Amino acid sequence: MHGFGIAEDLHRVSDALHVEEGSLYPALHRLESQGFVQSTWGVSENNRRARFYKLTPRGRKQVAVKVSDWRRMVEAVNRVIDPLVT
Amino acid sequence: MLSQFWVDVRTRLTALFGRRRLYARADEELQFHVAMREQRLIESGVPPGEAHSRACRELGNPTLLAEQAIDSWRYSFVDTLIQDIRYGLRTLHKNPGFTATAVLSLALGIGANTAIFSLFDVLLFRALPVASPDELVLATRRTSDGHPNLMLNNQQREAFAGSETLVGLCASRHSQLRATMSGESHFAEGMLASGNCFSLLGVSAVLGRVITEADDKSAEPVAVLSHRYWQRQFGANPSAIGQAITLQDRTFTIIGVAPRGFIGLEPGMPADIIVPVNSLGGPLLTNPNVFWLRLLGRRKPGVSIEQVHADLAVRFARIPRNSRLTGPPPKLEVVPAASGFGDVRMQFSLPLRILMGAVALVLLIACMNLASLLLARANGRRQEINLRIALGAGRGRLLRQLLTESVLLSGLGGLLGLGIASVATPLLAQSMSRGRTPILLDLALDWRTLAFVAAVSLLTGILFGIVPALRAIRQKDTIGAQHGTRLKTGSRRWSAALIVSQVALCVIVLVSAGLLLSSLRKLQQVDAGFRKEHMLMLGIRPDNYKGPAALRLHRELYQRFTALPGVESVTTFDDVPLGGVNVTTNDFSINSVGPRFFETMGIPLLSGRTLNEQDALERRPVAVISESVATRLFPDRNPLGQHLDVFGTDREVVGVVRDARYRSLRLPAEPMVYKPAFGAWSYGIRTTGDPAGLAAAVRRELREAARDVPVWSLDTLEARVDATLVNERMVSGLCSWFGGFALLIASIGLYGRLSYAVSERTGEIGVRMALGARQGQIVWMVQRDALILTLSGIAIGVPLTLTTTQIFRSLLFEVGATDAATFAVIVGGIVAVTSIAGYIPASRAAGVDPVIALRTE
């Protein structure tokens, strides 16, 4: 998927995460330099040259780790705030 | 996974060196993004003009984004490295004395290594500029007395030619050729080569064509020029092709120019004119008893050198031997020839190896000196380092920074060393070239030398920087260190070990130099049996003059030289003392000499008479013999009036002269029989003044008498005698310089250590003096340290030296490899020099004012 596609997907899934679109690119580059994604030149749906990004196996593992981290974090925060709201 | 790794490495390198490309990538991505967004906006009904600016706005600052994207790629260590280098340069700049000592001693060490290495490289390593040089092999003989001989002849060439193990076999020979162009003659470095040489080597012409096998059989002799000869003689003019050139007495047509790098197959002996072997080989081609060709083969792919040897040895054994020869048959050997072969290499192989060893030791000493300087400085910088550790600097980071500094020092040393080497190498090559044939080497810096310097500098910096750096950061007593800067015992032991090793290495280099020097002096004192002073030697090869014409030329030259002002007498001869002998029988050698030979050469007559002009003109059957011939052949009789057989001529002995050395100063005098002759083309001219000053006049006379006879050799006899000692002189001279330099560095190291010790013990010294210690006692206290270190170094160095000097025993003359006198002198010298190095800090210690010392404490 190319950078624009990623940005569009993010838009579609959640409006709340509407950050400045451009900052996606430094992030992608950083992920690639750490070996979590891999990129190649390809042709987009409207026949333009675009950089396509793909998760590497290491990246997939990292996603699992980060997701479970996040879940634990959310759970922990919830445990703290749940008594307050009820 | 691996491919991922390579992609990663590539991209990172791109980030490092190809910032622009990475920038272009980020830029294109961002543009694509804007274009896509714009399209979506238009699709959703936004007017086109507004769509673009909105797309841009939503993206953000593209330049900044691209910068950020690139930054995530950079290796952070490059930035750190630059920071470290800056910091290192600043610290070095702040300590000019330390920096200068370290850099200079390293520069001399590395420079000397580089100079010797480049000679080593050119003569022994560098591959010939031909196709697949690794496949080349040289067939050589080992004669029955065990001497290697690179020469073979046509008989072997034919026997080996059909070998299944070789792609082909070519024959060549280096030879000086008398070249004549438009009436002027000179000697050129030539090479006789079989017609298949060029094709076998894979060398083609840059202009015209090369010699082919057809030229071997052709009656039209042809010649190929080297690139440099073509430039020098023809101004690189393409019209040289097709011109005629007379070599010896035949006229050759120039057919081509060899590529720039190709100057023959023997390092040091260039080939400027290459002609077919058959064109000048003459009767040698069919003579089975003369060995004069070098046979070079190319292995077939997959065939080992042993297989080649096995096959050729069988073929070699099948060649019928000359029945007159006795003793065991010579053995065939096959050696790799990727980097060429030849006499120059054989001559200088041992000296260069010795020198390489000596300079390696010198570099080692310089490195140890660097290490001890760094060690002392690490102690001096303790507060700084402790402060940085306290402020949170990582030890790894500090180590890197200290190593950067030492590598910086060695790198600067390497650069300066390269400069020193570029001056020293040509000088060295020149000093090797003494003698008749100049040794010509291509000394341009090549990548090997540069790689050598880079490797040596880097290794020096890291290997000898790591211990001081580790010691500097491994200081646990951060608080205790604030107080003073006392050397810790660990560092103290290290620096003592360094100084002891330096002294030990100095002993090796200096004793070697001493032994070589005293054997050189012994060689120079050898009575060669003739007077070498005031003699000018001229050699010509007028083989175009024959019979009466030759005699006429000879007499004219004789008269012209005799008539020159400042000439005492003139003579001719076949063999010049120390120039080797040409004709030998079982009992003696034979030298054909002209009138006044003994008078001119200064060989004293013991009894009877010398040879005169009448003897030569009338070809009288007389001879003068040297005293060793007299004692050998006529031990119990008066040799005068006796007869002896010289190549079938019965000659009467009319005189006995003193022995003279013809082969070498190292070998005993040659038993020599002198027969009278005219027409030997070597002239000895005894002068009243400086013989070299007469050279121009002799040259002029020769030109006037015969314009087509070039000078073959013209130098003083003293220079010739010197030339026979070129190895000894070069090795002993350089070793002395290296030894002196090594001792200087070691003394600086010792001085540094003692000064440091004194400054650290100022308080203690103050107390001692306050308690009544005399100045002499204080001096001794410091000097004792110096003496202990020096003597320990000597104790280790002497046994080491005893084994090392065995390596160059063959260069020594009448001096044992364990010569006690040399050892004693060198050891005494080392003790004296180190005592001086120790005296300065010692006297400073003695000058300490106890009051001041105690107050500072």
Image (cartoon, coloured by chain):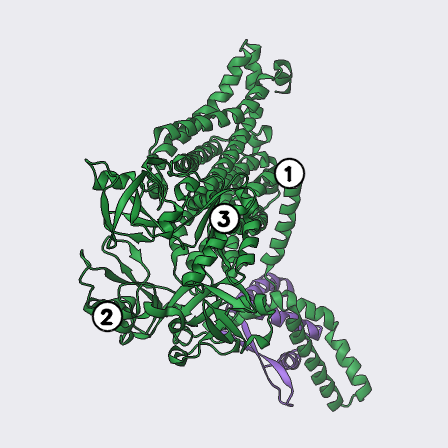
Chain colours: A purple, B green
Up-down relation of residue B531 to residue B306 (above or below): above
Q: Could you tell me how far apart the alpha carbons at marks 1 and 3 are, in whole angstroms?
A: 53 Å
Q: SS of the residue at dot 3?
A: strand
**Residue under pointer 1:** B95
Neighbours of disc 1 within 10 Å: few (<14), some (14-19), many (20+): few
Q: Is residue B9 visible?
A: no
**Residue under pointer 2:** B311
Q: SS of the residue at dot 2?
A: helix
Which image quarter holds the C terminus of chain B? top right
Q: Could you tell me how far apart the alpha carbons at marks 3 and 2 are, in whole angstroms?
A: 47 Å
Q: At label 2, which amino acid type do we have?
A: Asp
B651 with respect to B117 (left or right)? left
Up-down relation of residue B339 to residue B845 (above or below): below
Which residue sits at x=55%, y=58%? Answer: B703
Q: Which label's residue is closer to the chain start, 2 or 1? A: 1
* Residue placed most toward the observer, A62 or B364: B364
Neighbours of disc 2 within 10 Å: few (<14), some (14-19), many (20+): some
Classify residue B788 by image quadrant: top left
Which residue sits at x=23%, y=70%? Answer: B311
Q: Chain of mark 3?
A: B
* Residue placed most toward the observer, B842 or B693: B693
* Residue placed most toward the observer, B477 or B99: B99
Q: At label 3, which amino acid type do we have?
A: Asp
> Where in the figure is residue B795, as x and y percent of width and height?
37, 29
Q: At label 1, which amino acid type do we have?
A: Asn
Which residue sits at x=55%, y=18%? Answer: B764
> Mark 3 against mark 2, which lies toward the viewer?
3
Q: Chain of mark 2?
A: B
Q: Chain of mark 1?
A: B
Q: SS of the residue at dot 1?
A: loop
